[in-house]
Image: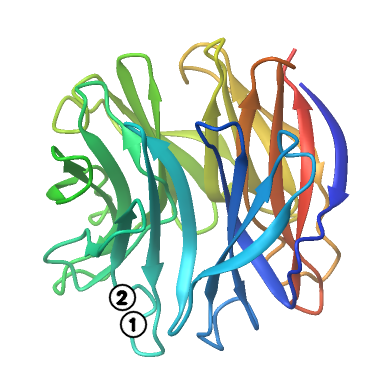
Amino acid sequence: MIVRDVAALDVGQTEHAAFPSLTRQPNGETHLVWRQGSDHYAARDGEIWRATSHDDGRTYDDAMRLRVGGDHRDPSLTVARDASYLTWFAGTSGNPAAGVYAMREWGPTIRVDTALARAATTAPVVELPNGELGIVYYGRKSTESRDTCWMAWSTDDGRHWTGQNRITNQLAAGRDTNEPWAVVDDDLVHVFYRWGMNSAIGMRTTSGSGHSGWNSERQILANATGRPTVLRTQSGMLVMVYRDQASRSAELAWSTDHGATWAQGLLLLSAEAGSPNGMTYAAMVEDTQQQVIRGVVAMERKDGTSSLYGFELDPA
């Protein structure tokens, strides 16, 4: 794995630009969405912005607001079953995880989670092996004090969401499992998540499209935290961006055996000394013609502001 061309992006962002997502559109454009706010969360004024790339993610322009009012957090944009889907969660001063929301083709806003007192998502919609759509998220019931990971699915292309299957449950151990990310790997579905708030990354896999058949929860990366953003390449490699627990830098891990074993620790972007949170998440798409991965990573400075940086990976 080789890291190349890490450079600051100029898409008109100010103050705290973070939590990016990337998707390749059917017309060849690459769309970048991110949360823009005054700070990481305290101001509760997060907006969702989008910018467009016409050169395979090398540069972005045409920045525009998609969602304003209240606090919109951790947006994800993806294309599944020939339609675009935007997901995010709401935050308020009284409830920092006030619900998971999805929008299909810029249509009605739909609440995805049901019967949870707190719920949030940091992940995009995925097309499951059985043809359904799935969203993974995290939250807790009113009787619970820890987060667990869940999945909802749709049988009508995102017009309605049902299910709410709990994927992780470490309540007895007193451990949160949150910020899940789902990846479809041929006939497998992998879900990656924080193993505890700031200690490690965990993983579960099923061949049952999320309804059942999950293998045992297991820890795959130590000294790792942040949202485990994972891309499955055309060759079958799994590539992850995570936050190093000690330095708060953005680092890379990868697997060539469907997640059974992992290499980790390659530096993507260093965190500035004194940064409150360091890496504020990343996003990736694969350029199959050039055989490279292009991405965006956000990083907080020590003054609490956050900026977006573009990068390129050679997975060879």
Q: Secondary structure at mark 1?
A: loop
The disc placed on residue 12 is none
Residue displayed at 73% across by 34% down: 265
Regarding residue 147, the answer to whether it shows in the image is no
Circle 1: is it few (<14), some (14-19), or many (20+) Cα within 10 Å?
Answer: few
Quadrant position of the N terminus in the picture: top right
Q: Position of residue 159 (x, y in %)?
A: 18, 50
Task: Give left or right: position of 172 versus 35.
Answer: left
- Residue picked out by circle 2: 98
**Number of marks present in the image shown:** 2
Residue displayed at 62% across by 24% down: 254
Q: Amino acid at mark 1?
A: Asn
- Residue picked out by circle 1: 95
- Compared to 168, does 16 lie above or below? below
Q: Position of residue 119 (x, y in %)?
A: 29, 66
Q: Amino acid at mark 2?
A: Ala
Circle 2: is it few (<14), some (14-19), or many (20+) Cα within 10 Å?
Answer: many
- Compared to 168, does 8 lie above or below? below
Task: Name the quadrant containing residue 14.
Answer: bottom right
Q: Secondary structure at mark 2?
A: loop
Residue displayed at 31% across by 75% down: 98
Q: Which colour style is shown?
A: rainbow
